[in-house]
Image (cartoon, rainbow, N blue to C red):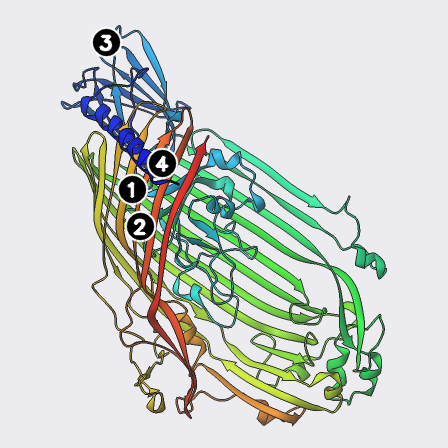
């Protein structure tokens, strides 16, 4: 682009801004301005909605004692009031939904505003301009087309009507989250288990909330609690979806905030994913659904036809329904949801198994292990192997049930409770190596949330939420007779002190030639979350104060006897000598994590078109501790690896920091407020802290709670004494530990943005935003290998990582 062209564009931009400022200062209405103008202002989220506004005449003079009525579109609830001396009105405790607002005053035309869409936690502010005329005349304004809000945050909001009309893969919200500007889907790994990054933040920095409480109750299905142990990840089903937390048919609203959100949000520095579930009404309403796919018209796999194998089944059934209605009309309501899923995934494969000749030649101590593999049905090779071809289907299931009860206990108090129970299971053949190894992986999610909203006075509202959640995962390996294999007797697999209920044995004779038997993983995550918000509304201010206290108690399940026996191929196994035998024992360890947040904020209506949200948030995240006498150990002397030693018992993993203050400010300026041509300029800046824990929960899987001993090139089987695991001991050698840098502090991100949103007629808008996020003191793990004879490896958590993100984000909305 030439210099001349850049200067011309700059002049055009300045002229564009000047025209809007001229209209705003002079108060000149653009051509075609309707008789009723509407400004929708969205404030911070709380369980119920609030509707307020000001009634003025054509000269912008306020109209006191104006009759205002608010009713929902179904006519089940109606509230009536008169405007005060300054022409304002306020209606509180409105459940999410669509409303009709009728405004009438003697000597003016009655204005009826239809389809005022109130979302969960919204505070919609209307400016109703009445035109002089006969009160019997009525002018109707469609508010539902106004999609531009004057909120300062960068966010995407989707309600259940939109969700019902969108095609959703697997009927979960992940595809909707991916539509949010700045969100990039990431590949989950064992060390980085999150599913998406928002504005360059790490994938484990996103925070999910369902009905105002934390849904970051993830639990790892591996040998270690990982990032989920510290509450960094949401609890997902075995499908990797959110269906275990809520069904999309039970979803009232999905809100994804990615930048400059208010101080009441932000325990982590990534996206804030806020979900509100649906409530019942005075009318019985329900819905049934069924989505299916099968292999009736699908051809068999080419390789299956070549090998003469039958076609494996392909099935997908996703079914369920919702039903809501009154228990006691106008007082008690229910909303029930059930969603089921059945999936069968076809597999066609050819693997190598011990040949029949090798099985016959094996010594008695080895023959049961080789006979456990499927019987070959293909050609043999010279290294004791033969081909085995087969077809089969893996399967997954889900059964998610939830029930929500809402109670209106008078004009001032509303209560609700919601229970959710969602078991899901994976059945995968060959996950332990051999195709007659069947992996059972049951996931069970249970949540119970209760809430109370009390209107202390018309201007003071308190909202309390309490949640208990429990999320458990197991991994169990079994041998069956698939392909003619003969399962190994438990007396051979486990010593007398262990069983398949708390132990696992893995046999390996080379790459892919292995199997496991027993219970490998049994991890549990538990959460207690208390959230309280107090709102105080004055003439131009909405003050809000709150606390959020969360306690996590992840449990790392015991593995009494975890033995891995490895041979140097089938021919090595025929010699009866194991190349290595590793015996590991893992104690059951219970950890305690505590997170506490407090905030104060003010949403200030500084002018009719200017809204400023500012406040301060404080984060307190002390290091985790072991339960009772289960001390989490750390090391001292990191500066000199040669003298590095174990720190005294009871030493904290890192020092608690108390100065984690996060100031934030955002503003939204409404350039033009005419229906269908609204223009909003918004911007914000703030500091956002992270939990900082990273994989700190993995300290439970190191010294002294995991103990291992290894034998090399030894005859198999081991004698009973050698097969016993090492006893608990605090004596060196330590082996492996995970420690924190002495100066470790909470990571933080500085965020800022500037955006312009323009309405493009009925139900359409376009948003252009510059968004920046600069991460500092981010978590980074460093390894010190073999520092001295007492340590094999020391993993050190530091604050040495940084990140920088700058982006131009564009979004088009149409409904």
Residue corresponding to mark 2:
265
Q: Residue at x 67, y 80 (%)?
A: 508
Residue corresponding to mark 4:
5
Residue corresponding to mark 3:
132
Horizontally, residue 285 falls left or right of residue 669, namely: right
Q: Is residue 502 visible?
A: yes
Q: Distance between the residues labelled 3 and 1?
A: 35 Å
Q: Is residue 350 above or below residue 294?
A: below
Q: Which of marks 2 and 3 is nearer the N terminus?
A: 3
Q: How far apart are marks 1 and 4 (CA)?
A: 42 Å
Q: Which of marks 1 and 4 is nearer the N terminus?
A: 4
Q: Which of marks 3 and 1 is nearer the N terminus?
A: 1
- Please tell me which residue lies in front, 210 or 283: 210
Q: Which residue is drawn at 34% across and 88% down?
A: 644
Q: Horizontal and vertical percent for residue 567?
A: 68, 85
Which image quarter: residue 550? bottom left
Q: Earlier in the sequence, mark 4 or mark 3?
A: 4
User: Are circles 1 and 2 on residues that touch, CB within 8 Å?
Assistant: yes
User: Are circles 4 and 3 on residues that touch, CB within 8 Å?
Assistant: no
Residue corresponding to mark 1:
44
Q: Horizontal and vertical percent for residue 646?
A: 34, 86
Q: Horizontal and vertical percent for residue 412?
A: 26, 36
Which image quarter: residue 206? bottom left
Horizontally, residue 366 falls left or right of residue 107, namely: right
Labels in figure, total: 4
Local SS, label 3:
loop
Are there few (<14), some (14-19), or many (20+) residues within 10 Å of tag 3?
some
Are there few (<14), some (14-19), or many (20+) residues within 10 Å of tag 1?
many
């Amino acid at each position: 682009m030439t210099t001349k062209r850049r200067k011309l564009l700059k002049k055009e931009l300045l002229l564009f801004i000047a025209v809007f400022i001229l209209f705003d200062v002079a108060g000149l209405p653009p051509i075609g301005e309707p008789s009723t103008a509407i400004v929708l202002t969205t404030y911070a989220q709380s369980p119920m909605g609030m509707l307020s506004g000001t009634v003025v005449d054509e000269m912008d003079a306020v109209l006191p004692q104006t009759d205002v009525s608010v009713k929902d579109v179904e006519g089940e609830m109606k509230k009536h009031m008169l405007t005060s001396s300054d022409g304002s009105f306020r209606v509180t405790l409105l459940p999410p939904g669509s409303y009709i607002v009728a405004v009438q005053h003697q000597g003016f035309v009655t204005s009826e505003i239809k389809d005022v869409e109130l979302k969960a936690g919204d505070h919609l502010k209307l400016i109703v301009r009445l035109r002089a005329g006969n009160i019997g005349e009525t002018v109707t304004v469609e508010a539902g087309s106004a999609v531009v809000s004057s909120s300062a945050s960068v966010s995407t909001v989707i309600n259940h009507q939109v969700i019902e009309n969108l095609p959703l893969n697997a009927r979960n919200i992940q595809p909707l989250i991916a539509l949010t500007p700045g969100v990039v889907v990431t590949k989950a790994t064992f060390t980085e288990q999150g599913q998406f990054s928002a504005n360059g933040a790490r994938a484990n920095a996103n925070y999910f909330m369902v009905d105002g409480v934390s849904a970051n109750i993830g639990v790892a299905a591996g040998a270690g609690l990982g990032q989920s142990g510290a509450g960094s990840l949401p609890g997902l089903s075995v499908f990797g979806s959110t269906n275990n937390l809520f069904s999309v048919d039970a979803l009232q609203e999905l809100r994804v905030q990615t930048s400059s959100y208010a101080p009441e949000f932000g325990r982590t520095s990534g996206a804030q994913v806020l979900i509100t579930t649906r409530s019942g009404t005075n009318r019985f309403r329900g819905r049934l659904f069924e989505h299916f796919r099968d292999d009736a018209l699908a051809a068999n796999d080419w390789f299956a036809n070549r090998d003469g194998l039958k076609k494996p089944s392909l099935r997908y059934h996703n079914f369920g329904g919702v039903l809501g209605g009154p228990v006691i009309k106008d007082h008690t309501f229910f909303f029930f949801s059930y969603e089921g899923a059945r999936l069968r995934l076809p597999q066609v494969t050819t693997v190598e198994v011990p040949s029949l000749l090798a099985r016959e030649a094996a010594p008695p101590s080895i023959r049961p292990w080789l006979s456990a593999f499927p019987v070959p049905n293909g050609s043999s090779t010279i290294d004791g192997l033969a081909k085995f071809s087969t077809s089969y289907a893996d399967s997954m299931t889900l059964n998610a049930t939830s029930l929500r009860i809402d109670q209106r206990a008078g004009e001032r108090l509303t209560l609700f409770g919601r229970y959710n129970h969602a078991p899901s299971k994976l059945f995968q053949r060959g996950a332990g190596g051999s195709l007659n190894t069947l992996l059972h992986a049951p996931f069970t999610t249970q949540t119970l949330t209760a809430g109370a909203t009390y209107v202390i006075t018309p201007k003071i509202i308190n909202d309390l939420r309490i949640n208990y959640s429990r999320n458990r995962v197991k991994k169990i390996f079994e041998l069956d007779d698939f392909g003619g294999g003969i399962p190994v007797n438990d007396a051979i697999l486990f010593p007398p002190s262990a069983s398949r209920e708390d132990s696992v044995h893995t046999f390996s004779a080379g790459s892919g030639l292995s199997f496991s038997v027993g219970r490998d993983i049994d991890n549990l995550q538990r959460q207690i979350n208390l959230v309280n918000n107090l709102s105080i509304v004055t003439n131009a201010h909405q003050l809000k104060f709150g606390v959020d206290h969360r306690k996590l108690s992840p449990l790392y399940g015991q593995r009494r006897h975890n033995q891995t026996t490895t041979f140097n191929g089938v021919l090595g196994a025929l010699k009866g000598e194991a190349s290595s035998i590793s015996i590991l024992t893992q104690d059951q360890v219970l950890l305690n994590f505590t997170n506490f947040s407090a905030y104060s904020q003010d949403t200030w209506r500084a002018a009719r078109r200017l809204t400023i949200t500012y406040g301060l948030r404080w984060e307190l995240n002390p290091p985790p501790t072991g339960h009772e006498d289960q001390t989490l150990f750390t090391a001292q002397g990191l500066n000199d690896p040669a003298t590095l030693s174990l720190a005294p018992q009871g030493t904290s993993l890192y020092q608690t920091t108390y100065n984690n203050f996060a100031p934030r400010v955002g503003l939204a300026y409404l350039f033009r407020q005419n229906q269908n041509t609204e223009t909003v300029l918004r911007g914000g800046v703030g500091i956002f802290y992270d939990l900082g824990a990273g994989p700190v929960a993995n300290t439970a899987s190191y010294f002294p709670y995991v103990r291992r001993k290894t034998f090399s090139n030894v005859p198999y089987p081991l004698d009973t004494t050698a097969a016993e695991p090492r006893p608990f001991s605090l004596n060196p050698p330590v082996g492996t530990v995970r420690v924190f840098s002495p100066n470790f502090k909470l990571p933080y991100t500085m965020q800022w943005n500037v955006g312009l949103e323009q309405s493009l007629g009925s139900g359409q808008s376009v948003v252009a935003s510059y968004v920046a996020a600069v991460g500092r003191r981010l978590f980074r793990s460093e390894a010190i290998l073999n520092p001295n004879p007492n340590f094999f490896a020391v993993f050190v958590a530091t604050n040495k990582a940084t990140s920088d993100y700058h982006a131009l984000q564009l979004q088009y909305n149409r409904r």
